[in-house]
Image: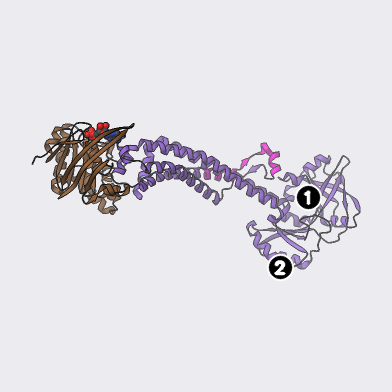
Chain colours: A brown, B purple
Amino acid sequence: MSIIAIKALVKDYDVNGIAVNAVRGIDMTIDKGEFTAIAGPSGSGKTTLLNIVGGLDYPTSGSVVVGDRDLSGMSSSELSDMRLNNIGFIFQAYNLIPVLSALENVEYILLLQGVSKKERQDRAREILIEVGLEKEISRLPKDMSGGQQQRVAVARAIVSEPEIILADEPTANLDQKTGANLLDLMHELNRKKNITFLFSTHDSMVMERAERLIQLSDGMIASDEKRR
Amino acid sequence: MMTFIKLGWRNIWRHRRRSLVVISSIGIGVFAMMFSAGFMNGMNMQMVENTISTSLGHIAVHSKGFQENMKLEFNFNADRNMLGKIDRTPRVKAWAPRVKMQAMVRSSESSRGVMIVGIDPGREKNVSKIYDYTRKEDGSHFITGRNTDEILISREMAEKLDLLVGDRLVVMLQDKHNEIIGTGLRVCGLYETPVNSYDRFVVFTGIEKLQSMNGMGANISEISVLLNDKKDVDAVKSSLVAGIDEGSLEILSWKDMAPGLVRSIRLFDTMMFIFFAIIFMTVVFSIANTLIMAIMERFHEIGVMKSIGTGPMRIFFMIIFEAFNLGLIGVVAGIVVGMALNFVLSYTGIDLSLYQESMRVWGTGSVIYPIIRFIDIVNAVIIVFFTTFIAALYPAVKAARIKPLEALHFI
Ligand SMILES: Nc1ncnc2c1ncn2[C@@H]1O[C@H](COP(=O)(O)OP(=O)(O)O)[C@@H](O)[C@H]1O
Ligand SMILES: [Mg+2]
């Protein structure tokens, strides 16, 4: 059963009157529980694709269905609700709210969802322990390493158990080893909780760890292979 | 909600110095407001107190018409019955009868138009402060009896007329037959009140002396009544009105007798309010400026918050709370410091003897004791929160409208 269905997706940006074709006709479906990497060189359209799937950007044409929601008919506040309740985001860097501790950053999502304080704290703590940050629970982002910050971002993305987690080059600012660990963590969570992961990368180490690898080139799919 | 208040609070302290600048500008504004309000209130209060203690009393019984036109014909007979009623009225401290009329005083040097007041010295001491304001050295003393040929004049008038204690002067007035009569009286003493206009114009003699001069017999112009507490004025006035039901009389409170004073106090209050509003217009810009800077710096972060599903209303309130926190600290600091200073000054007073003459024109006395009223604090809080809200509105809307995608690009 597909959880993301993309049909004839096109996205043009208007840069000073000149159309830039960021995505030029993409069709693909992602099934529940997949662990998929979108690879491709810089400028190939990875970020644009993820932003549209996450409801942060609108397509020029084509359709995107996430779960049973057709994004093209949704208002910005409906999209905001979808991002809160159905999708977890991990960005490249500076994911966290600087004035909140690790625990509070993770709690934040649950707070927006209206979960009670007690439950919020219990769940956030549990997830942080799961991602190996027991000791860092009350630290502020500035007092954590880049890898630890990304782990908090993963914890925050996962804590509300969304259908999909979108991660745009989550390891780009990390060294090889830290990046590999982060990816292993994501993969483990993917298997344990059966949450769909869709992440972009141009790092071969990350690509190796994906179960499915979709290569983009110039806004189009160049290859799509299942690896496991 | 709590978390957004907390967020607003913590965000303030990310730029400690910048926030402190805003907080102190609010604090100084509030402080200036408390100080000038305290000063103004003190001045108003002293103006009122001095006017009451020199001339008005709290309540006066007059013949109808006397208040508009101080003519001799508006006199009345205060019989035992009426005086007894005043005496028995609760919360009345003292009363004194007076005869008041226009006259001229002439010395060998010059002459002046005056209001001559015939008093019962014993009773007058309990009602007005003229006795306290009378010099008791160098032969100067208060009127000693109801029918002596003494006259009490102000120090200023003595200078103008070139008179010393013990000198004689002539009082000319129109008696009840409209005849001009002149009587020689001896200056028994000099007085000086804080109310300049009063000193220029008023002289005192014994009540029976004046009655015999003008031919009115035992009739008087007013009964001045002093209460234990000024705030009972309206209540006591109504019970006096109910008790003394003579159609030809009217009973007036100090507010009725000095509408100009009441009006000018109200005008002062309005002026203060406008003045504060202007001060806080500048505060608006300082707050708005700081918030806009803060939002620019946190552009990416607000983008992240919106990306992960924070609605625009919540972002809006986060910024509003941030402004409120700034305003709250500022207003509390300003009030605490302002109250402390006012508290100290309400004992020591602010000595303006350097400007003595101009202070006398206002009738306040040369030492001002500031007074802070509850309403001043309420005003300060309202003005600060109102201005902070106005200042925060634009930045908050701006922040709420940040497009997550654009902000994410911006690191
Ligand atoms: N907001 C934008 N405005 C204009 N052009 C953009 C914008 N975002 C992306 N692009 C262009 O679209 C193309 C794809 O960009 P992007 O999706 O960011 O690629 P990737 O993430 O694979 O590096 C690039 O040519 C880029 O310059
Ligand atoms: Mg990209």
Q: Which residue lies under the disc numbered 2?
A: B243
- Tell me: B62 left or right of A176: right
Q: Which residue lies under the disc numbered 1?
A: B142
Which portion, as a residue range, is magenta? B338-362
Whether residue A184 is visible: yes
| The stretch drawn in magenta includes residue B342 | yes
| Magenta span: chief secondary structure | helix
Q: Nearer the viewer, residue B67 or B41?
A: B67
- Tell me: B326 left or right of B253: left
Q: Quadrant of residue A50?
A: top left
Q: Nearer the viewer, residue B352 or A14?
A: A14
Q: Nearer the viewer, residue B115 or B307?
A: B307
Q: Nearer the viewer, mark 1 or mark 2?
A: 2
Q: Are marks 1 and 2 on the same chain?
A: yes
- Image mark count: 2
Q: Identify which amino acid the numbered label 1 is placed on.
A: Phe
| The stretch drawn in magenta includes residue B311 | no
Reply above or below: B343 against A46.
below
Q: Which residue is at 17% across, 47% downward?
A: A195
Locate the C terminus of chain A by quadrant.
top left
- Tell me: B249 left or right of B346: right
Q: Which one is earlier in the sequence, the residue at label 1 or at label 2?
A: 1
| Mark identifier at residue B230 | none
Q: Are marks 1 and 2 in contact (CB under 8 Å)?
A: no
**What percent of the width, then of the height, locates residue B303?**
32, 40
Q: Nearer the viewer, residue B234 or A168?
A: A168
> Mark 1 — on which chain does it sit?
B
CA distance for labels 1 and 2: 33 Å
**What percent of the width, then of the height, locates residue B147?**
84, 56
**What percent of the width, then of the height, locates residue A180?**
15, 36
